[in-house]
Image: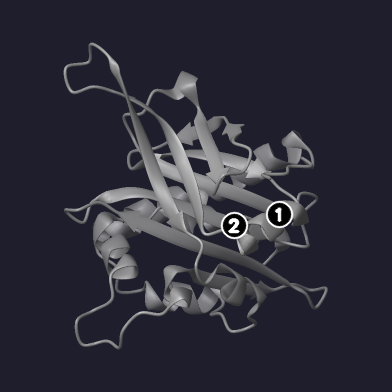
Amino acid sequence: MKIRQIALFAAMVLGMSAGALAQDAAAPQNEPQRTPEDNWFKVCEPLDSGQKACVMRQVVLGNRGQFAGSFVLRNDPGQENRLLAIAAVPVGVLLPFNLTWRIDSGQPIRVQYYNCDATACYALLPVNEEYVKSLKLGAKLVISGKAPTQDGQSTRDFSVDINLAGFTAVYDSDDAPTFEELQQQNAAASPLEQAVQNRAQQMRTEISDSADQTGGANTNSQ
């Protein structure tokens, strides 16, 4: 698989159906008790250079099991912007207000929405090692924004809490399935899931190209 093709398979990881998200975010009843590391899912792909391109993801579900938001960190040494963070929230948000990311009581960062599809709206931000360090030291990343009220006459605030417990262990670990292994696991996906994955396949190139145009941002959260 070429570097360009795997550079942002985070889009595919984000673009899963609600059913798949529920399976990812909630442990089955017959499984052992979840650990902090279970907050995160990681996929890595070997590069020709001998290094690995990796993606970490956390999905948050609402009280009824609906998709509430997700956070992805891509670490790809084959890209100019090696570290890229992506947040996704349900559609229906107010795009002009953008998203605000904040780690614990640190400095908030305003992040513009990049794109929306039928399932979510996405915001991406090239980050640096200092930001990753902040994620490692933090307890919670809050992603917040604005959406219209039910009657459409006003706005309401919403927020998604990303639990940073287990982030360091998973980020530093070499134990992760490859992209091919992940595809094999998804081979039995429903037609709806497959359609969403196909859409995410298209998004990978779009987001990767956008990240290249953005340039390396020297982003600090604290």
Residue under the point 41% across and 80% down: 35
Within the image, what quadrant is residue 19 found in?
bottom left
Check if mark 2's residue and mark 1's residue have beta carbons within 8 Å. yes
Residue under the point 48% across and 39% down: 122
Residue type indicated by callout 2: Leu
Residue situated in front as seen by the camera: 216 or 104 = 104
Residue situated in front as seen by the camera: 57 or 222 = 222
For label 2, the SS is strand
Separation of residues labelled 2 and 1 (CA atoms): 7 Å
Q: Quadrant of the C terminus?
A: top right
Neighbours of disc 1 within 10 Å: few (<14), some (14-19), many (20+): many
Residue that lies at the very extreme toward the top in this rendered image: 153
Q: Position of residue 128 (x, y in %)?
A: 75, 51
Residue to which mark 2 is pinned: 73
**In the shown orientation, is residue 71 left or right of residue 67?**
right
Residue under the point 58% across and 64% down: 55
Q: Quadrant of the N terminus?
A: bottom right
Neighbours of disc 2 within 10 Å: few (<14), some (14-19), many (20+): many
Residue type indicated by callout 1: Leu
Within the image, what quadrant is residue 46 found in?
bottom right
Within the image, what quadrant is residue 159 found in?
top left
Residue 162, numbered circle? none
For label 1, the SS is strand
First in sequence: mark 2 vs mark 1: 2
Residue to which mark 1 is pinned: 83
